[in-house]
Image (tube, coloured by chain):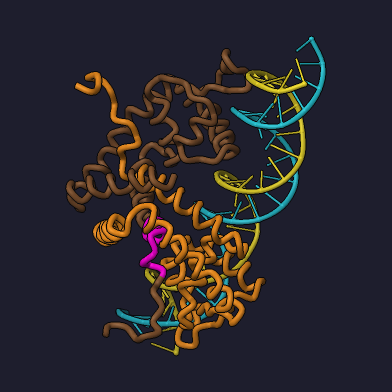
Chain colours: A brown, B orange, C yellow, D cyan
DNA sequence: TCCGGAATGTTGAATTTTCAACTGTTGAAG
DNA sequence: CTTCAACAGTTGAAAATTCAACATTCCGGA
């Protein structure tokens, strides 16, 4: 009898809430790490995705970087202004625009990757590599099953 | 030898990325459910926290609802305009403002709770109650250990 | 008592995101 | 061939968020 009969369950037991809370916290940690290079988390995701040298359409990139379409357009505008990426009209389908990472962007990614890996290492240490692997696996299947 | 030696690990293996992705997905699902009542997820969180009848200071509420301070101020402005909550200056510390849920707000929460529980039920079914419990536990400890 | 620093919220400007509407392109049906 | 619906991306206005600066109140020490 730990609760009175009418005690409603708090929102803190909802998966949606816990995910939002954890995401907020981890995102903040990453944000402060990336602040060294003055790069927002969204731009880090975009750059990392593009860093393999392949171009991506806006649609694919939006999906990969977890951004809405118009938001991505404007973020890419800013990144083009900073010479981090560039647009090329897709020769095969002229509705599409391919985004590529510039040399400057690639150099930035090389400085960013260690910062992100630092976070992973930090989490592994303070949270446990086992728990982390388990959590990642559960998140992946959650995304697969509902996304 | 599944990867070439120089293959960089994709961003999709980072915990920060997986959390962002899962959060985005689950949040969207919740959003569409709450759309029935036209309530943004952030307001749902605020209302649910306040629905026990106790007042909260802006600071406590911001923490509980996962919002920054100025964002909360303006969100509460909107909710006051909609008569969902009201402000009362804290008698014990006049720097503080206590936020309470109005009757209208409470009635709304009663319609919202089933929508949120529906999501939990849906997830339990399509993802597994076991996996869900495990995921919740892992998220809680992650938050404890890093937050 | 009075001062000054810390805590609590709010505000206004600037930035960012979102929504809906729009342009241009493709592909398939007739 | 045309035509037209669907697709890809952008745009401009509106809404929301963030940042920095600003009150106001509290509290501890001179």
Q: Position of residue C19 (x, y in %)?
A: 66, 48
Q: Give the residue displayed 50% in from the left and 53% down from the top.
A: B29
Q: Is residue C26 left or right of residue A134?
A: right
Whether residue B63 is situated above or below residue A82 in the rendered picture:
below
Whether residue B7 is situated above or below residue B122 in the rendered picture:
above
Q: Which quarter of the figure has residue A68?
A: top right
Quadrant, the C terminus of chain A:
top left
Q: Is residue C20 left or right of residue A133?
A: right
Q: Which quarter of the figure has residue D11?
A: top right
Q: Give the residue displayed 27% in from the left and 83% down from the top.
A: A2
Residue A32 in view of the camera:
no
Whether residue B10 is situated above or below residue B7 in the rendered picture:
below
In this orientation, which residue lies closer to the viewer: A61 or A75? Answer: A61
Q: Position of residue B2 (x, y in %)?
A: 23, 23
Q: Position of residue B95 (x, y in %)?
A: 49, 78
In this orientation, which residue lies closer to the viewer: A81 or D1? Answer: D1
Q: Give the residue displayed 18% in from the left and 50% down from the top.
A: A128
Quadrant, the N terminus of chain A:
bottom left
Q: Give the residue displayed 49% in from the left and 77% down from the top.
A: B51
On whether residue A137 falls in the magenta region, the answer is no
In this orientation, which residue lies closer to the viewer: A39 or B63? Answer: B63
Residue B32 in view of the camera:
yes
**Residues rendered magenta in the picture:** A11-20
Q: Position of residue A58 (x, y in %)?
A: 54, 29
Magenta stretch, overall SS:
helix
Whether residue B57 is situated above or below residue A94 in the rendered picture:
below
């Amino acid at each position: 009898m730990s609760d009175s009969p009418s005690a409603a369950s708090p929102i803190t037991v909802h998966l949606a809430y816990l995910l939002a809370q954890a995401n907020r916290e981890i995102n903040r940690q990453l944000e402060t790490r990336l602040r060294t290079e003055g790069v927002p988390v969204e731009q880090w995701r975009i750059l990392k995705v593009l860093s393999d040298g392949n171009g991506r359409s806006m649609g694919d990139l939006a999906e990969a970087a977890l951004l809405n379409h118009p938001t991505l357009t404007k973020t890419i505008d800013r990144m083009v202004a900073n010479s981090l990426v560039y647009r090329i009209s897709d020769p095969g389908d002229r509705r599409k625009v391919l985004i590529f990472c510039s040399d400057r962007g690639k150099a930035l990614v090389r400085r960013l990757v260690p910062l992100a890996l630092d976070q992973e290492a930090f989490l592994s240490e303070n949270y446990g590599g086992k728990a982390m692997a388990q959590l990642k696996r559960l998140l992946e299947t959650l995304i697969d099953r509902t996304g």
